[in-house]
Image (tube, rainbow, N blue to C red):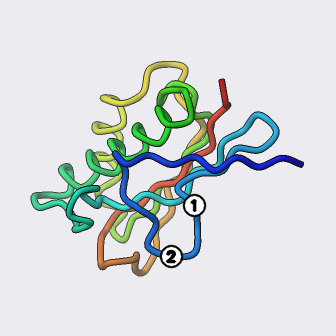
Amino acid sequence: MSRKVIHSDNAPAAIGTYSQAVEVNGLVFMSGQLPLDPASMEIVEGDFAARAHQVFKNMTAICEAAGGSSDDIVKVNIFLTDLSNFATVNEVMAEYFTEPYPARAAIGVASLPKGTDIEAEAVLAAR
Protein backbone atom coordinates (compact mmCIF):
# COMPACT_ATOMS: atom_id res chain seq x y z
CA MET A 1 0.00 0.00 0.00
CA SER A 2 1.37 3.36 -1.02
CA ARG A 3 0.38 6.48 0.92
CA LYS A 4 0.80 10.04 -0.30
CA VAL A 5 0.50 12.96 2.08
CA ILE A 6 -1.56 15.89 0.78
CA HIS A 7 -0.71 19.38 2.05
CA SER A 8 -1.96 22.88 1.28
CA ASP A 9 -0.57 26.14 2.63
CA ASN A 10 -4.08 27.53 1.98
CA ALA A 11 -5.52 25.37 4.74
CA PRO A 12 -4.60 25.32 8.43
CA ALA A 13 -1.47 23.44 9.38
CA ALA A 14 -1.99 20.30 11.44
CA ILE A 15 -2.21 21.08 15.16
CA GLY A 16 -1.25 17.57 16.18
CA THR A 17 0.23 14.33 14.98
CA TYR A 18 -1.69 14.04 11.71
CA SER A 19 -1.62 15.10 8.06
CA GLN A 20 -4.16 17.41 6.42
CA ALA A 21 -5.01 14.50 4.11
CA VAL A 22 -3.63 11.18 2.94
CA GLU A 23 -4.20 9.54 -0.45
CA VAL A 24 -4.29 5.77 -0.69
CA ASN A 25 -5.71 3.46 -3.36
CA GLY A 26 -7.43 6.27 -5.26
CA LEU A 27 -9.13 7.82 -2.23
CA VAL A 28 -8.12 10.91 -0.26
CA PHE A 29 -8.94 10.87 3.44
CA MET A 30 -9.13 14.42 4.79
CA SER A 31 -8.58 15.20 8.45
CA GLY A 32 -11.15 17.21 10.33
CA GLN A 33 -11.14 20.87 9.36
CA LEU A 34 -11.87 23.56 11.91
CA PRO A 35 -12.84 27.15 11.03
CA LEU A 36 -9.23 28.26 11.37
CA ASP A 37 -7.76 31.05 9.30
CA PRO A 38 -4.68 29.40 7.71
CA ALA A 39 -2.56 32.54 8.17
CA SER A 40 -3.30 33.25 11.83
CA MET A 41 -4.32 29.73 12.93
CA GLU A 42 -7.14 31.37 14.90
CA ILE A 43 -10.86 30.67 14.70
CA VAL A 44 -12.40 33.14 12.24
CA GLU A 45 -14.52 35.89 13.73
CA GLY A 46 -18.20 36.25 13.03
CA ASP A 47 -21.30 34.14 13.30
CA PHE A 48 -21.80 30.42 12.81
CA ALA A 49 -22.20 30.85 9.03
CA ALA A 50 -18.78 32.54 8.85
CA ARG A 51 -17.22 29.62 10.70
CA ALA A 52 -18.98 27.08 8.46
CA HIS A 53 -17.76 28.93 5.35
CA GLN A 54 -14.18 28.79 6.66
CA VAL A 55 -14.44 25.04 7.23
CA PHE A 56 -15.52 24.52 3.61
CA LYS A 57 -12.88 26.93 2.31
CA ASN A 58 -10.25 24.89 4.14
CA MET A 59 -11.67 21.67 2.74
CA THR A 60 -11.66 23.13 -0.79
CA ALA A 61 -8.00 24.11 -0.46
CA ILE A 62 -7.08 20.55 0.47
CA CYS A 63 -9.15 19.16 -2.42
CA GLU A 64 -7.24 21.46 -4.77
CA ALA A 65 -3.90 20.34 -3.29
CA ALA A 66 -5.00 16.76 -4.07
CA GLY A 67 -5.58 17.79 -7.70
CA GLY A 68 -9.35 17.95 -7.46
CA SER A 69 -12.24 20.04 -6.23
CA SER A 70 -15.08 19.78 -3.75
CA ASP A 71 -17.04 17.97 -6.48
CA ASP A 72 -14.69 15.00 -5.92
CA ILE A 73 -15.84 14.62 -2.31
CA VAL A 74 -17.91 11.47 -1.91
CA LYS A 75 -18.49 11.54 1.87
CA VAL A 76 -18.60 14.33 4.46
CA ASN A 77 -18.93 14.03 8.22
CA ILE A 78 -19.91 17.25 9.97
CA PHE A 79 -19.56 17.58 13.72
CA LEU A 80 -21.69 20.20 15.47
CA THR A 81 -21.92 21.18 19.11
CA ASP A 82 -25.42 22.57 18.43
CA LEU A 83 -27.58 20.66 15.95
CA SER A 84 -29.86 23.68 15.60
CA ASN A 85 -27.15 25.00 13.22
CA PHE A 86 -27.93 22.18 10.78
CA ALA A 87 -30.06 24.37 8.49
CA THR A 88 -27.22 26.89 8.21
CA VAL A 89 -24.82 24.07 7.32
CA ASN A 90 -27.15 23.08 4.48
CA GLU A 91 -27.23 26.67 3.17
CA VAL A 92 -23.45 27.00 3.32
CA MET A 93 -22.82 23.57 1.77
CA ALA A 94 -25.00 24.53 -1.20
CA GLU A 95 -22.38 27.17 -2.08
CA TYR A 96 -19.52 24.64 -2.20
CA PHE A 97 -21.11 21.52 -3.73
CA THR A 98 -23.13 20.71 -6.83
CA GLU A 99 -25.42 17.76 -7.46
CA PRO A 100 -25.00 14.93 -7.06
CA TYR A 101 -24.13 15.86 -3.49
CA PRO A 102 -21.78 13.72 -1.43
CA ALA A 103 -23.05 11.32 1.19
CA ARG A 104 -23.09 13.05 4.56
CA ALA A 105 -23.55 12.60 8.27
CA ALA A 106 -24.20 15.34 10.81
CA ILE A 107 -23.09 14.36 14.28
CA GLY A 108 -23.89 16.21 17.49
CA VAL A 109 -20.92 16.34 19.86
CA ALA A 110 -20.29 17.84 23.29
CA SER A 111 -17.18 19.79 22.33
CA LEU A 112 -14.62 20.31 19.57
CA PRO A 113 -10.96 21.40 19.47
CA LYS A 114 -10.21 25.06 20.15
CA GLY A 115 -13.73 25.52 21.52
CA THR A 116 -15.34 25.82 18.10
CA ASP A 117 -18.83 24.67 17.18
CA ILE A 118 -18.16 23.01 13.80
CA GLU A 119 -15.65 20.60 12.28
CA ALA A 120 -15.88 18.56 9.09
CA GLU A 121 -13.91 15.73 7.52
CA ALA A 122 -14.23 14.20 4.08
CA VAL A 123 -13.27 11.43 1.71
CA LEU A 124 -12.72 12.29 -1.93
CA ALA A 125 -11.99 10.30 -5.04
CA ALA A 126 -8.50 11.16 -6.29
CA ARG A 127 -8.11 12.32 -9.87
**Quadrant of the rendered image containing residue 95:** top left
Q: In this view, does 8 lie to the left or right of 35?
A: right
Q: Distance between the residues labelled 1 and 2?
A: 9 Å
Q: In this view, does 69 lie to the left or right of 36?
A: right
Q: Where is residue 102 in the image (x, y as percent from the top left)?
A: 57, 33
**Quadrant of the rendered image containing residue 24:** top right
Q: Toward the viewer: 64 or 78?
A: 64
For the residue carrying disc 2, how many other residues have a C-alpha within 10 Å: few (<14), some (14-19), or many (20+)? few
> Could you say whether the residue bearing mark 1 is in a helix, strand or loop?
loop
Instruction: Give the residue pinned by disc 1.
Output: 19
Q: Using the image, tell me which numbered label, if any, was put on residue 16.
A: 2
Q: As displayed, is residue 101 above or below residue 51?
A: above
* Residue appearing at x 70%, y 46% in the figure: 4
Q: Is residue 126 left or right of residue 24?
A: left
Q: Position of residue 11 (x, y in %)?
A: 37, 50
Q: Which amino acid does label 2 sit on?
A: Gly
Say if mark 1 contacts mark 2, CB within 8 Å: no
Q: Is residue 14 left or right of residue 115?
A: right
